[in-house]
Image (cartoon, rainbow, N blue to C red):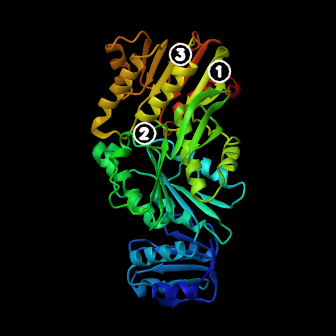
Amino acid sequence: MKPLRVKEIRNLLQGELISGSELWNVSNAIYYNRHELTKRNSLMFVSRSDSINWQEINNKGPSLVISDKPSSELKNALSDTTVIRVRSLVQAYWKFMDHYRNLFQIPVVAITGTCGKTTTKEMIKHILSKRWNVQASISSKNEPRQSLPYLMGIAENTNAAVFELGLGNTGNIKHQCNIYQPTIGIITNIGVHHLDGCGNLEGYIKAKSEIVDGIKKNGTLILNADDANTKKVPLQSFKGKIIYFGVSEKSHFRASNIKFANNGMNFQIHISNKKYNAFIPGYGEHQVYNALAAIAAVNEMGMDIDEAISQLATFKNMTRHLEFSDGLGGSTIIDDTWTNNPTSVEAALKVLDSIGQGKKVILVLGDIKRLGNFEKKYHREIGSMVAKRNIHTLITIGSKAEDIANQAKKEGTEATVHIFKDVKGAIDVLEPILDENSILLIKGPMSSRSMIDFANSLKENKRK
């Protein structure tokens, strides 16, 4: 965080100094009881309903408390704590963040989408980090409450920022865009997820579309030209620049000659009548789409295409994202337990279509969560996808995933099907059939520690 004088903050917020000194600098900001107080020189927003531990705050002093509590409740501050009372904490909170964000005239990228958010964000960060100091959200920790600490991570030496936008409910993306004020927005794709928080697919698309109005004036929107649901995003109100990526002719960043290579994908990129050869670590056509979005973003920030492609080739594919390992009996294990939704399942099955030819293909599929009233529909659709393919063994884990198995059997799958409530018992099915000709895909929700541990237990290098 760029240090700010307490007096400057009080003037900005038009607050009343209740106690303490204002002649020192704040170098950290949190929302009290939402974020952990771990640093000295911290500003904290304290709501009327919060119970204040003055000793804890003072122990990390000098500390700055900003609150709209009655003055009588704020006079218990200790010697190393400054207290400023404001009329409205909500207004003060947003005014402070808007002021802080606009201290920096740097490119800020915000990424949403059903799949590929974290990977695309990490690709952009990796490419830019060769030359720039980049602030980014951590892993897939993209909840709205993380937005304040991430914004405060922008400092005087920051050249660019890239943030992943989490969506659990309608309004989440709008909230985060109000904080980040992105100059570049990316929608990787829109599949099916979080229907419990958005009502239905139309509500989910509408929630994703919030990014359109969240981009700063004269900003850039980067969209998947080939994604059916992204085409439903209303763009009439957007006055900035739109860049499309994909394989269709509409794409400004277009991929062709996509081929599986050693540990990744070879492809060509067509940009403004020029053609470039590229490679991205990680398997699947979806990985190429992620790469196109990342290259479009860094190019919009001024990076040369050749340099971006060269740096992209050194990207390290993310853990548990179609991660290949040697497994039991000489088998190949594909660990895809990072996330689980219909779009990511389909992408993983498409990878198997290419690399699983001539192999004994085994699927271990877990529950897909947050589908609301539509969970049976989409689990059955996955069962239909499985039934169309040459699968040796299908194992489902969880009560919801049982619909995958039942639908696959209903549609005449030739796979041997096993249904389990949890991972117990699945290893007894797998051990006798895993050999050098076997390729096993395991997909489950990242919230399922048992699925993640089970995937690790199948890998030779992770077994005790």
Residue in the foreground of this view, choosing between 104 and 364 = 104
Residue 463 appears in view: yes
Camera-nearest label, 3 or 2:
2
Evaluate whether residue 169 shows in this view: no
The CA distance from mark 3 to mark 1 is 14 Å
> Around disc 2, counting alpha carbons within 10 Å, would you say few (fewer than 14), some (14 to 19), or many (20 or more)?
some
Q: Which mark is residue 361?
A: 3
Task: Pinpoint residue 412: horizontal percent, then vertical percent.
Answer: 35, 11
Residue 327 — which label?
1
> Nearer the observer, disc 3 or disc 1?
3
Q: Is residue 126 left or right of residue 195?
A: right
Task: Identify which residue is drawn at 45% across, 88% down.
Answer: 14
Q: Which mark is residue 226?
A: 2
Please identify the quarter of the rendering in which residue 326 is found: top right
Residue in the picture at 50% in, 89% down: 11
**Residue at 42 percent of width and 73 percent of height:** 47
Q: Amino acid at mark 1?
A: Gly
Quadrant assignment for the N terminus:
bottom right
- Say whether disc 3 or disc 2 marks the residue closer to the N-terminus: 2
Q: Which of 277 and 168 lies nearest the eye of the viewer?
A: 277
Number of marks in the image? 3
Q: Are marks 2 and 1 in contact (CB under 8 Å)?
A: no
Answer left or right for 395 relative to 330: left
Left or right: residue 83 versus residue 234 is right
Contact between marks 3 and 1 (CB within 8 A): the answer is no
Task: Tell me residue 420's x, y (percent).
Answer: 43, 21
